[in-house]
Image: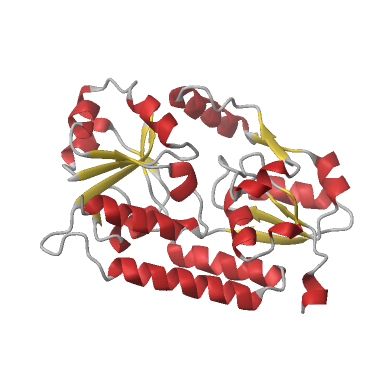
């Protein structure tokens, strides 16, 4: 089996895929990654095959407007360097079909693949739930001829999740938790995040497992009266989240955020459907017992 997969050249178009490849012990097979891939640290020196014209330093409201405009215009906010991709000659290309905003979407992926010769083996990840994330790990393992490693990784992640679930944060009453992945406008985290909250011993009062994240007005969110508000901005770290929080002036937002509010690294823990989702569950569990 080693001879079969040793020479594979892998290009990852999204951070979650990069993290999965690395967790399978195949980081050395990565020859190119997306502009957002930053973990594990060793991948930061790899060629970047994607980019974006949207400045991440813009305020979140401006980023949201730019994303909406790109969607209306039918253009992708993410660009692909086809010349570099051709030079890298990937055997395996890993993309996604979850979000057209955060990474190369399905349509753009198809165009990229059509332009490459020889044609790489395409692995498309589309997790919306924890189980979907585990399934995607198995898919990557299959593509890289690392089935046993993928099975071992998933089993280890499931074990850690069971340990989180065996230590309920509040046996007498599950804390009511609201997770925000964007602040201007406010977006409630969906997909796998409500499951993470449940695994950590809480009750997600804003999101629905497996459903996309969605915008909701501050007044509606304040009426949910959560015990804990978790700010985990999509694609941003703790420092950026705190700076965004400091700019929120809405009166209903002040009422909501005046409750117990914790900030975590959404970029690292909740935005990416990969192995670190389990880290997120463990982190949320610790927050709930404070």
Task: Left or right? Give the position of 49 relative to 172.
Answer: right
Quarter containing the N terminus: bottom right
Q: Position of residue 139 (x, y in %)?
A: 62, 68
Applied colour scheme? secondary structure
Q: Residue furthest front?
A: 42
Q: Position of residue 91 (x, y in %)?
A: 81, 60
Percent x, y for residue 239? 42, 31
Is any part of residue 63 visible from this angle? yes
29 over 255 or under it: above or below: below
Q: Position of residue 199 (x, y in %)?
A: 31, 63
Which residue occupies 46% across, 22% down?
59
Placement of 69 over or under 274, stated as above or below = above
**Where is residue 51, by image quadrant?**
top right
Foreground: 66 or 287? 287
Q: What count of labels does the image hold?
A: 0
Closer to us: 190 or 141? 141
Say whether residue 205 is visible. no
Name of the residue lying farthest toward the left = 172
Q: Is residue 158 above or below residue 229?
A: below
- Give left or right: position of 244 versus 42: left
For the point 74% across and 42% down, which residue is it? 49
Q: Residue at x 65, y 50 (%)?
A: 106
Q: Residue at x 54, y 47 (%)?
A: 99
Q: Is residue 231 left or right of residue 38?
A: left
């Amino acid at each position: 089996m080693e001879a079969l997969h040793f020479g594979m050249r892998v290009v990852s178009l999204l951070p979650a895929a990069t993290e999965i490849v690395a967790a399978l012990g195949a980081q050395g097979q990565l020859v190119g990654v997306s502009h957002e891939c930053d973990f594990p640290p060793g991948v930061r020196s790899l060629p970047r095959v994607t980019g974006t014209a949207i400045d991440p330093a813009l305020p979140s409201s401006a980023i949201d407007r730019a994303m909406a405009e790109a969607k209306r215009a039918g253009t992708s906010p993410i660009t692909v360097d086809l010349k570099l991709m051709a030079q890298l000659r990937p055997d395996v290309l890993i993309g996604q079909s979850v979000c057209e905003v955060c990474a190369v979407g399905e349509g753009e992926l198809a165009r990229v693949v059509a332009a490459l010769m020889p044609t790489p083996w395409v692995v498309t990840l589309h997790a919306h739930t924890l189980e979907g994330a585990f399934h995607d790990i198995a898919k990557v393992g299959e593509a890289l001829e690392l089935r046993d490693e993928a099975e071992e990784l998933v089993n280890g992640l499931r074990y850690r999740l069971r340990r989180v679930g065996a230590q309920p944060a509040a046996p007498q009453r599950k804390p009511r938790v609201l997770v925000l992945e964007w602040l201007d406008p406010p977006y409630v985290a969906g997909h796998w995040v409500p499951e993470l909250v449940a695994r950590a011993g809480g009750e997600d009062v804003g999101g629905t497992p497996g459903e996309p994240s969605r915008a909701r007005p501050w007044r509606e969110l304040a009426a949910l009266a959560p015990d804990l508000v978790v700010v985990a901005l999509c694609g941003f770290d703790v420092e950026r989240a705190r700076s965004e929080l400091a700019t929120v002036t809405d009166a209903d937002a002040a009422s909501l955020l005046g409750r117990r509010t914790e900030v975590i690294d959404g970029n690292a823990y909740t935005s990416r459907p990969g192995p670190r989702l389990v880290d997120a569950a463990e982190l949320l569990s610790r927050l709930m017992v404070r």
